[in-house]
Amino acid sequence: EIVLTQSPGTLSLSPGDRATLSCRASQSVPYNYLAWYQQKPGQAPRLLISGTSNRAAGIPDRFRGGGSGTDFTLTISRLEPEDFAVYYCQQYGTSPPVTFGGGTKVEIK
Amino acid sequence: QVQVVQSGAEVKKPGSSVKVSCKASGGTFSSYAFTWVRQAPGQGLEWMGGIIPRFATTNYAQKFQGRVTITTGEYTGTAYMELRSLRSEDTAVYYCASATYYYASGSYYWAHFDYWGQGTLVTVSS
């Protein structure tokens, strides 16, 4: 089972800042099959990115995914007020099981 | 666009079972795959398992093997997740999501989870 470690646990930033979130896998993720989700308080997760860098429908282009092998990143180029949330990475290169990272909270500084 | 709607909150006693439903609309039922993910209070996401009705394929996370059953209602566009022998640690929000899957080397594999239900809070308490 691939274990995903996200860092940092919390990111304190201001609107307009650039956010860089990391997701590191315990072994190489086959085909770079990695997704990112956003979750706001009291809401279900929402798919942002699949296949490392493919934005889901309706996701603004300020969200960019990248990386390969064991190291992946989600970059939010300029934080909007609605972007403050928790972000999870998920690998599906070896599934089942699907595994998630522990999450990174992006909070307002 | 697919919409996923789940059944309402449940309160259960330790040792009992819970069955949560999830109905998808906006697409063709035969094309759906459903997966279940839970989230304990203040914690992260944990995959439980899923079902691809079209190919009669069901997978469960090892942690839940023998305690969870995921099914679909024939022709109803509804999926169900039953969790048995409940304990306090099962208190969580349970999410259903429609999922993308792929086929390779003779098997089906889960990919990303596209549309999520609103979640169902299951509280296990004596």
Image (spheres, coloured by chain):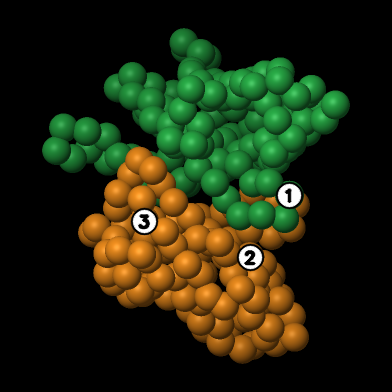
Chain colours: A orange, B green
Q: Is residue A64 left or right of residue B40?
A: left
Q: Residue furthest right?
A: B126
Q: CA distance from mark 3 to mark 1?
A: 24 Å
Marks 3/1 in contact by CB < 8 Å: the verdict is no
Can residue B18 be seen?
Answer: no
What chain does badge 2 belong to?
A
Q: Which residue is mark 3?
A: A2
The x, y position of residue B26, in whole percent, is: 51, 32
Q: Which of the pair B73/B89 is nearer the observer?
A: B89
Q: Residue furthest left?
A: B105
Q: Find residue A83 and report its image quarter.
A: bottom right
Q: Are marks 3 and 1 on the same chain?
A: no
Per the rendering, the mark at residue B41 is 1
Query: Which residue appears at 30% of the width and 22% of the height?
Result: B55
Query: Which residue appears at 71% of the width and 76% of the height?
Result: A107
Q: Is residue B8 left or right of residue A98?
A: right
Which of labels 1 and 2 is toward the front? 1
Q: Secondary structure at mark 3?
A: loop
Per the rendering, the mark at residue B103 is none
Query: Which residue appears at 41% of the width and 47% of the height?
Result: A98
Q: Secondary structure at mark 1?
A: loop
Marks 2/3 in contact by CB < 8 Å: the verdict is no
What chain does badge 1 belong to?
B
Give above or below for B7 relative to B97.
above
Name the quarter where the C terminus of chain A is drawn.
Answer: bottom right
What chain does badge 3 belong to?
A
Number of labels in the image equals 3
The x, y position of residue A103, in whole percent, is: 57, 64
Q: Which of the pair A37/B90 is nearer the observer?
A: B90
Q: Is residue B79 left or right of residue A91?
A: right
